[in-house]
Amino acid sequence: MLTVRNVTIYNGQTRLLEGVNFRVADGEIVTLMGPSGSGKSTLFNWMIGALPADFQASGELWLNGERRDTLPTARRKMGILFQDPLLFAPYSVGQNVQLALPADVRGEARKIQVQQALAQAGLSDFAHRDPETLSGGQRGRVALLRALLAQPQALLLDEPFSRLDSTLRESFRQWVFARLATLAIPVIQVTHDPQDIPENGRVLQMADWA
Amino acid sequence: MAAPLRHPLILLACAAMLAIYLPLAPALAMLLTPALSGDNWRALFADAQFWQSLTATLVSTTLAVVGALAIALSSVAALWPGASWQRLSARLPLLLAIPHVAFATAVLLLFADGGVVYRLLPFVSAPYDRYGIGLGITLAVKESAFLLWVIYGVLRSQTLSQQATVLQSLGYGRGQTLWWLIVPAIAPTLAAVSLAIAAWSVSVVDVAIILGPGNPPTLAVLSWQWLNQGDALQQAKGLLACLLLSGLLGLYAGVGYAMWRVWRRVVPTFSGVRRPSQIRWPGVSLAVLLPLCGVLCSLLLVVIAADASLRPDLLSTSLTLALGSSGVALVVSLLWLEAGLLRFSRWIWLPIALPALPLAVGQYRVALMLGIDGEYGAILWGHLLWVVPWMLLVLQPAWQRLDARQMLVARTLGWSRIRIFYRLKLPLLIRPGLAALAVGFSVSIAQYMPTLWLGAGRFATFTTEAVALSSGGGSSALAGQALWQLLLPALFFALTAYGSRRAGDYRQGLR
């Protein structure tokens, strides 16, 4: 269970969000909707512990009964997927995925798990490729694999479908939601496109906290 | 109108740059000539001070480069991205704006025998520094501000900060983010700046003389002493030492490249071990202390210089040289950017990337050949060799950001090349131009070797006077010259910042 409690965010003297309160159950996908500039990404940045320097925030973030907003990003155990896949340029596709594996997966097992994960994403032959040579959809899949293999306790999706063209977008969306359905973790996505909302998914409007 | 002007402008731009960079060629030829004689080499290696000075140079340069990198990277690891990083970048000019000579003078007045520290703690005595450790540490602190300032410009990329967030969301700590993500992303910049720091440190003369009047000389100082003697063998030894300094720089570049190659093979380990905890206090403390060093330096000079009087001759020479050289350099730089052969222009950075001593020797020889040594114009010309590339370093990125489509539209309106330059490009370059002027002014104020050699000792500036006083003058007079050396660029920076702000207000009014 993920709980956001009484969050208020200021940008200088301007109040961006006030009284943000919501809960997301394990296995649930909640969609935050709002137009550009409504504070969706800022809220995510606060949740992940990467609020830009010119913002100030108050409020609490709880995950599985433990307060997380006071912890650094590395200790929050929350995954994030941005608009851009943000694969690490110095490393190959396989190395990007391997970085996500826990340390208790050792030796040859690490390579096997990477190969299996890439195969599930239809990217079997891409382990040694430069991320720059992949298409947008392929990069998005690698980014999701990377986020999930780290075994996060919650996942934040910051408009991960918005940069894809309409055909690719639909197939990638289905692939993502199918993967997420197998996990029992809270997932929050922000979007301004109603088509991104999963079937029977709960929607929260950013306008309610403006 | 535009076509007939093109070739004369190109010729003018190339001629101006050639006149400034001319000493590079004789410097190279002069360095190589004595190297052909085995006797000269034997005399150099047999000199009683040579090995000691070489060791001091190696120690001080290594300390300066490694120290500056350590300070800068630990600050990045501890603070970037975040509010503290923004605060540090806002306060960096407090140290950045202090000229090397003024900073070294403050260090001398603080730590030398009879300095403030030893007057407060009489039971402590200043250690005998035979290996240039004090010089290395001083340069490391001063150069770390420059390094951080350059890194600040590179780290403004939003993509990199989001990648750092992603890596940390996988459970990796700030230290791992630094080594795995940030360093590879900023490696080209780090390499270029580290090379510039090594080039400066390996051949620094003025700061070494100030900090170590009683210590064994570094190789650059020894070379400087030999080159100031009339004896042909001493001159040859001085030139060989200059050649060695250039070789040392090549050695540093080679070692740096080899370390980078090894590092790329072994980092990261991909073992999945997370180190989310990181000791942040060294980086945080250094980030607080760095700007404080600048404030402390200024305060110390103000207090000690309380009884010192301003020498109008020094003020006049320093001011006119700095205004003249930065003004000429601005015109030359704009001409070069507008009409120069930018595709073949890597050589323009050589004065920043090469040890200064051989270049100053080259300038002096050219001045002797032309019979202009001892002339005011010769010093101004000498300063341009360093002022122009530093100003281009500020101006070129702004020039490259100009939208070529705007120029195209202007051409379709029938505007001539000159009209496009002064009606379209110049207004957009007012603010970077003012910043470049301020940088050029402070570079000129800091020049020691060209001023002394090309002026044949007839033109004293705050910088030459501070170095002269460091080995025998009174503390108050020394602090006075250093303080003015600090104040002039600071006042000019403030003036250009005000001008820049007014220009910004004017442009907002336009909108």
Image: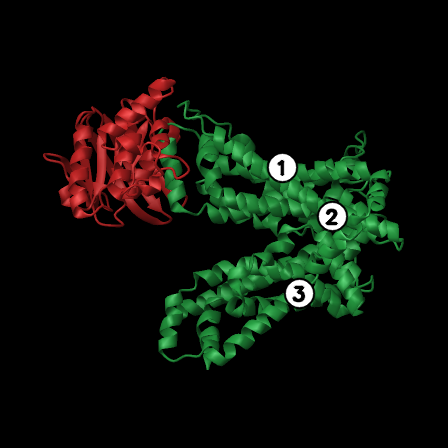
Chain colours: A red, B green
Quadrant containing the C terminus of chain B is: bottom left
Q: Residue furthest right?
A: B231
Residue pointed to by mark 3 = B20
- Compare marks 3 and 2 and give the one earlier in the sequence: 3
Q: Earlier in the sequence, mark 1 or mark 2?
A: 1
Spot occupied by residue B332 in the image (x, y as percentages of width and height): 59, 68
Q: Chain of mark 2?
A: B
Secondary structure at badge 3 equals: helix
State whether residue B360 appears in this view.
Answer: no
Density class for disc 3 (Cα within 10 Å; few <14, some 14-19, many ≥20) is many
The answer to whether residue B68 is left or right of residue B432 is: right
Q: Which mark is residue B67?
A: 1
Of the residues shown, which amino acid type is indicated by label 3?
Ile
Tell me the distance, in whole angstroms, between the alpha carbons under discs 1 and 2: 25 Å
- Does dot 1 land on a helix, a strand or a loop? helix
Q: Amino acid at mark 1?
A: Gly
Q: Which element carries disc 2, helix, strand or loop?
A: helix
From mark 3 to mark 1, how far is it between C-alphas?
A: 33 Å
Vertical placement of A138 versus B444: above or below?
above
The three-letter amino acid code for the residue at tag 2 is Leu
Q: Which residue is mark 2?
A: B243
Label 1–label 2 contact, CB within 8 A: no
**Residue shown at 57%/50% (left/top)?**
B93
